[in-house]
Image (cartoon, coloured by chain):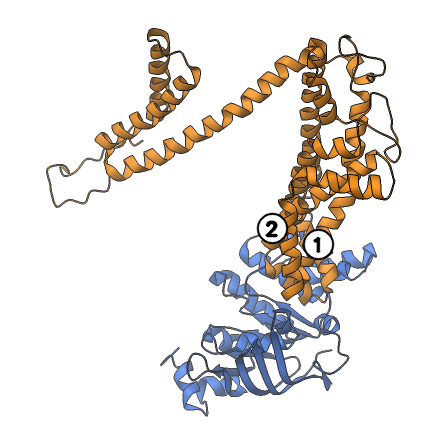
Chain colours: A blue, B orange
Amino acid sequence: MATRIDVTGLTAYYGKFKAVADVNLTIEPKNVTAFIGPSGCGKSTVLRTLNRMHEVLPGARVEGKVLLDGEDLYGAGTDPVNVRRTVGMVFQRPNPFPTMSIYENVIAGLKLNGVRKKALLDERVEESLRGANLWEEVKDRLGRPGAGLSGGQQQRLCIARAIAVEPQVLLMDEPCSALDPISTLAIEDLITKLKSSFTIVIVTHNMQQASRVSDATAFFSLEKTGDPGRLVEFDKTSKIFTNPTEKRTEDYVSGRFG
Amino acid sequence: MSTATVSGPDIDSDPDHLRLRGRTLPRWAPLAGAAGAVVVSLLIYLLTPVDSEIQIVLMAALGFVVATTVVSTVVEGGRRARDRFATTLVYTAFLLALIPLVAVLVSVISKGAGRLDAGFFTHSMNGIGARDVGGGIYHAIIGTVEQVLLASVLAVPFGLLVAIYLVEYGRGRISRVISFFVDVLTGLPSIIAGLFVLAFWVLALDQGFSGFAGALALAVLMIPTVVRSAEEMLKLVPNELREAGYALGVPQWRTILRVVVPTALPGIVTGVMLAVARVAGETAPVLLTVFGTNLINSNPFSGEQSSLPLYIYSQAGQPQKFAVDRAWAAALVLIIIIMVLNLAARLFAGRNRLK
């Protein structure tokens, strides 16, 4: 139950500003795909177009096609709410709901969409927290506030919350950039484990992380500030990091710039 | 205050040595300064012809600020002295600001407590003249509680919805226009709200004086306060929480209802309480719309009612001691009611927060 994503001719705007232009790529099911590139190159923007979170910002819009198993996310009649139930997202900074306990945070997506059956919710909480490698740490304090956990635990709580609604795809926007190395390792292990059930797309500034966890890598870059970002190269991670086709990719991954 | 001594090179005589420590005043220095200023001004009060209490208090405050700053300049040097100056200024301003609050409480309690007995709460003013000893505020309490509750029922949902529209949905022109009119309403003198309801509801629509007419006028005054405070609180909710909700496939209205509003709730409740406290003390609009009566009328939808501010106004205006005593006691009750409402709202808001 995982999904292929086909992106064709994708261009994203913030008001009049063209943030990223003409992106074409295919994300394979049950794979981890990493987006890398310097700041401002549009990798987070592209990620947010994959579950229609881009348009949440005022003035933001998208041109082009994003096909989820052949269905156009931006087609007429597509409901963004349904898209986001299918394509989950984890953000850069852990953002558990401050008014909710750990338990309520995990099932927030279900409960806010009307699931009431206690047995089902209990089961889903344990399943999701185990899925996020957090169950053992919090099983005795599910009633405590989610905001009381450490940063790494909070981020895993957010992952548990995202997988509790059983999406097909999981988008991660720099999920480790606010975390220490130990928590980062825990999240990376988790990504490898989640790969067996979800299609995962991760934006990262950390090239080692991209080479550790991903199967495919997309390198984005921009000519100069003010220009739209573009997809420079998209290939297997091993190829991008050892023998890239483009000179610019090689310069970036070998640390010659960026 | 650091009392530890560091053994090592003689720092003071070595000009090249790093100077990380400076000379500081002991921690009790500000307290001593304050005590000194108070003692000196008391002496001036007792020994010299200066006999104005206000002057003495101001002299003590000024003496405290000046003495602390001067001593600090001599001992600690310029930067720390400026820090001390600002700190003492803040403390002094705080104490001076407390004076009116304490003075009001003391005078209301001392003058009002004597008349507070069971009879005062259980009787109206029916048949009581200004020279009579008895009488009570039962009818006025009923009036105030009913009018303020009705006004809140009208104004709070309305104000909250406007605030949600402005923060979560409003874009462009309409929201700017609404925002502007809320500002206009904020500056509306309360008697104008009363005049408006008098002309429109009581006279033009011929509904007559009633508690509900008063509630309408009070609601007009509450709405802008509720909108502004709720708006500020909703703006404080981080956008990340909204995005987290959307990313879970939760529709926007549900995210607002279940995530955004609960997060902002304690602040919203505080804002509502401020609005309630403000209108509970309004006299002018109530005078024009509720009219006032000495009789018990527990139906806010028909006939004149009384209310505490109105009661205080009418009793305090009479030249008899018993009437003025009743006014002080009613003022004390009004303060207590507002305080109790405030505490209740805080408890309610605190219950929704996780421990």
Most foreground residue, B112 or B118: B112
- What is the chain identity of the residue bearing mark 1? B
Q: Amino acid at mark 2?
A: Glu
- What is the chain identity of the residue bearing mark 2? B
- Would you identify the image quadrant in which residue A117 lies? bottom right
- The percent position of residue A251, horizontal first and vertical second, equals 39, 84
Most foreground residue, B352 or A35: B352
- The percent position of residue B297, horizontal first and vertical second, equals 87, 26
- The percent position of residue A45, horizontal first and vertical second, equals 56, 75
Q: Please name the residue that numbered disc 2 is placed on.
A: B232
- The percent position of residue A191, horizontal first and vertical second, equals 59, 70
Q: Please name the residue that numbered disc 1 is placed on.
A: B162
Identity of the residue drawn at 85% across and 21% down = B295
Quadrant for the N terminus of chain B in the image: top left
In this view, the mark in front (1 or 2): 1
The answer to whether A232 appears left or right of A120 in the picture is left
How many numbered callouts? Answer: 2
